[in-house]
Image: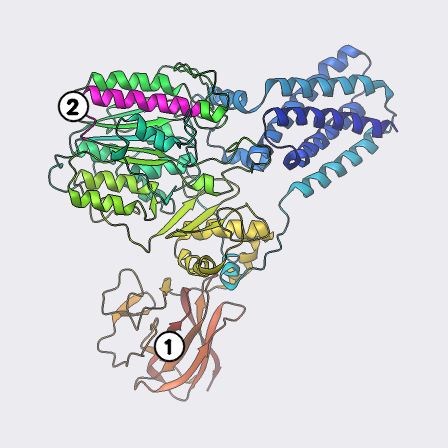
């Protein structure tokens, strides 16, 4: 009976206080009671240890030993609960992936700021008092064998709750292309952003066009397209920003804009460089930032932000000679009022002064943070008391900051000649409608509509040629991205990259291709996290591979099943993504997690592959004999054998009507029976391929047509030679509906003759 009373008391106190906090913060009760029960179960384990293993002779010893342990453990449990609440993962699982490292300069202050914003002090104190109270009351009432019974029961409760709160195996039935991703290793490099010498990169082009002399880029943290204006019941924040300029008709608002990532440490580097989230760490650090482009045209560069840069490697990333003036929350030791950020309005006032005091052409980047959860609620701009909603109060700060920037540009005569882009780095899910039933899962794992649609407003410089203006207007109905900003700046400044570099995004003053494929990622080579989320988009269609729905591997942006055209497009986009290693691994991670398939699934297969030549891509299916087998191929096509390239000329081979020859020719073999097998990489999808063996006179010795690989991912053909042959060729043809990687040719003599 004592055990039951003990468990009931501790669990009830914790869950009651949890409910009070959750309701007060409007975070939804039912969705998180399981996590609360898990935390309570962990507390029970601690109580069992303290009460059973430590016998106390007096209360002083009890106070000195047991109570501090309980308080510290209770504190850890609260932080763990908050991690479950915001990220859907335990603190243990996410600790190694946090963007703030304890070894970083100022990490203590950053950790304190996070703790202050996300962990309510009253909740911590209440939980600690409840733990101490139950310990004092039950201390002398425990039987001698309590430790054994309570430890077993508490451990059982903890395991039960933990298993119940983990992601179970979904009911999805994967298609063949989805199954292919289950055979792909999902490990990604876990690096951090660093500083690099981008200014040394040569840029080409004639002089800057007279119509665009200044660049103003305002990045609004967590500002989605759905964010409402502070005071207007009919305007979005994006529309209100254009109204604040004094001439809303000059502004363009895209109808189909997407973010590169829902994570700031991916999205902001992509915005500033034009690098895609699916591209490599090396590519990111080679592409010039917007600042480098501006310096090439003699503009003075300024970056102003209310955020601390001491997280995610940003302090190193922005340590660049191309930034003339860098002002952040770390510059003056600003007081953090929202997450790790100071007052956006105070930063805008600093920028206002800097603009007025500078006569040179300017490139300005502003990074505002008021709309980051839990939303900036107080500001020097005196938010009207009549605005009660926290997010609208934050919107008021953003609007006031834009007003200051516009005022400074107009007073110095720069406004008309400026390209101004105000963009959200991504949207947000939590608190978007203020109701308890709103989805509360983290945007790190749920790429829902409010998350992937950022605020996006563009004012071109006055006097822009009519052609460019017309193209920009037409692009407002195209699929555009936050990675298009840097190429657009380069286009306006009439700059081109060296031949060794290219943008994943597009210049918005040029037509955006209708068949463009866009990627949104939450994990890549410079951002680590236990779980991933991916969105594939083309035209007006979006395919989400995330955790909105555990029963379906691929959904729309509302977590609903795909239908019709989008369902057909899914297969095409998934096949195309097999050629993007970072996207491929991220999708694999989500699929395996949702189907509870271990990453070890691929290991036995991978170990069986004996590769004797370099990887050679096959597909897409429209390619013909010998054409573009490798990216480095010449247009006439090549044959490949043991790493050597040969043009098809001179071999006397008759091209087949369709397909690609991948291997051969001229293998010298002794008499015997042979087995030749082309080895494929996990994830390969076969529709129709052919394997044949040809002698020196192009006489076919053996041929097979294959639509399915064997268990070793091999496509084989057997043949027999009665005499020594010096011109044997083993060939592989790709006909239709196949995509993947051939990694080599295995040739084995089965029997001598």
Q: Position of residue 521 (x, y in %)?
A: 43, 44
Q: Earlier in the sequence, mark 1 or mark 2?
A: 2
Vertical order, 674 against 332 (above or below): below
Q: Position of residue 392 (x, y in %)?
A: 45, 25
> Front-most of 266 and 73?
266
Mark 2 — residue? 360
Q: Is residue 114 left or right of residue 370?
A: right
User: Does residue 340 appear anywhere in the picture?
Assistant: no
What main secondary structure does the magenta stretch of the protein show?
Answer: helix
- Residue drawn 33% across the image and 37% down it: 271
User: Does residue 544 appear anywhere in the picture?
Assistant: yes
The Cα atoms of the two marked residues, 1 and 2, are separated by 67 Å
Q: Position of residue 167 (x, y in %)?
A: 62, 45
Q: Secondary structure at mark 1?
A: strand
- Residue drawn 46% across the image and 29% down it: 100
- Residue drawn 44% across the image and 80% down it: 704
Q: Position of residue 579 (x, y in %)?
A: 39, 57
Mark 1 — residue? 730
Residues rendered magenta in the picture: 394-417
Residue 281 drawn in magenta: no
Q: Secondary structure at mark 2?
A: loop
> Which residue, as the protein is rendered here, is positioned at the far bottom?
722
Marker disc for residue 131: none
């Amino acid at each position: 009976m004592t055990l039951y009373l003990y468990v009931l008391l501790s669990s009830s106190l914790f869950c009651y206080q949890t409910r009070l906090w959750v309701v007060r913060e409007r975070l939804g009760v039912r969705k998180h009671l399981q996590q609360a029960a898990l935390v309570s179960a962990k507390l029970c384990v601690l109580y069992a240890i303290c009460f059973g293993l430590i016998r106390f002779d007096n209360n002083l010893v009890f106070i000195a030993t047991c109570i501090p342990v309980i308080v510290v453990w209770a504190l850890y449990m609260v932080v763990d609960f908050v991690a479950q609440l915001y990220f859907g993962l335990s603190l243990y699982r996410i600790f190694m992936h946090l963007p703030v490292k304890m070894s970083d300069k100022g990490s203590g202050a950053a950790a304190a700021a996070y703790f202050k914003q996300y962990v309510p002090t009253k909740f911590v104190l209440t939980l600690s008092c409840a733990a101490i109270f139950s310990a004092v009351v039950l201390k002398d009432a425990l039987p001698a064998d309590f430790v054994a019974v309570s430890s077993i029961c508490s451990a059982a409760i903890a395991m039960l709750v933990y298993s119940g709160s983990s992601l179970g195996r979904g009911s999805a039935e994967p298609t063949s292309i989805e199954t292919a991703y289950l055979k792909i290793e999902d490990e990604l490099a876990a690096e951090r952003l660093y500083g690099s010498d981008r200014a040394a990169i040569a840029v080409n082009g004639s002089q800057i066009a007279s119509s665009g002399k200044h660049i103003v880029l305002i990045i609004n943290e967590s500002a989605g397209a759905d964010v409402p204006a502070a005071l207007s019941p009919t305007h979005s924040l994006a529309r209100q920003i254009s109204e604040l300029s004094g001439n809303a008709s000059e502004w363009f608002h895209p109808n189909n804009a997407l973010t590169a990532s829902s994570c700031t440490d991916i999205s902001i580097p992509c915005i500033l460089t034009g690098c895609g989230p699916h591209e490599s760490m090396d590519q990111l650090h080679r592409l010039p930032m917007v600042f480098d482009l501006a310096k090439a045209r003699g503009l003075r560069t300024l970056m102003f932000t209310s955020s601390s840069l001491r997280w995610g490697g940003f302090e190193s990333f922005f340590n660049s000679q191309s930034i003339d003036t860098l002002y952040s929350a770390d510059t003056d030791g600003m007081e953090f009022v929202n997450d790790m950020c100071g007052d956006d309005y105070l930063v805008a006032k600093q920028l206002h002064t800097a603009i007025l005091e500078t006569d040179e052409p300017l490139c300005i980047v502003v990074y505002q943070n008021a709309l980051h959860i839990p939303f900036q609620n107080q500001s020097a701009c005196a938010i009207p008391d009549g605005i009660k909603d926290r997010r609208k109060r934050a919107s008021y700060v953003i609007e006031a900051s834009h007003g200051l920037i516009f005022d400074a540009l107009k007073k110095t005569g720069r406004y008309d000649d400026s390209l101004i882009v105000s963009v959200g780095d991504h949207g947000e899910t939590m608190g978007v409608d203020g109701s308890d039933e709103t989805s509360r899962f983290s945007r790190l794992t749920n790429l829902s509509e409010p998350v992937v649609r950022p605020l996006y407003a563009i004012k071109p410089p006055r006097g822009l040629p009519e052609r460019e203006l017309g193209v920009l207007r037409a692009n407002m109905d195209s699929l555009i991205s936050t990675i298009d900003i840097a190429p657009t700046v380069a286009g306006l400044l009439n700059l081109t990259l060296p031949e060794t570099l290219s943008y994943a995004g597009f210049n918005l003053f040029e037509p955006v291709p209708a068949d463009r494929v866009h990627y949104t990622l939450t994990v890549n080579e410079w951002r680590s996290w236990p779980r991933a989320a991916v969105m594939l988009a083309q035209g007006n269609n979006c395919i989400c591979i995330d955790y909105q729905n555990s029963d379906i591997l691929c959904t729309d942006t509302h977590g609903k099943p795909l239908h019709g055209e989008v369902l057909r497009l899914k297969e095409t986009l998934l096949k195309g993504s097999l050629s993007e290693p970072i996207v491929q691994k991220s999708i694999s991670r989500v699929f395996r997690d949702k189907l509870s398939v271990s990453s070890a699934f691929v290991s036995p297969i991978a170990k069986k592959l004996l590769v004797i030549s370099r990887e050679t891509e096959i597909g897409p299916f429209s390619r013909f004999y010998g054409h573009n087998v490798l990216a480095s191929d010449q247009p006439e096509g090549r044959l490949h054998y043991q790493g050597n390239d040969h043009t098809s000329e001179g071999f006397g081979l008759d091209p087949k009507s369709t397909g690609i020859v991948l291997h051969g020719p001229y293998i010298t073999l002794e008499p015997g029976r042979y087995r030749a097998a082309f080895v494929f990489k996990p994830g390969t999808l076969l529709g129709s391929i052919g394997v044949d063996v040809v002698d020196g006179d192009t006489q076919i010795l053996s041929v097979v047509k294959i639509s399915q690989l064997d268990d070793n991912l091999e496509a084989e053909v057997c043949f027999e030679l009665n005499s020594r042959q010096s011109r044997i060729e083993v060939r592989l043809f790709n006909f239709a509906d196949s995509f993947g990687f051939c990694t080599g040719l295995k040739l084995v003599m089965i029997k001598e003759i």
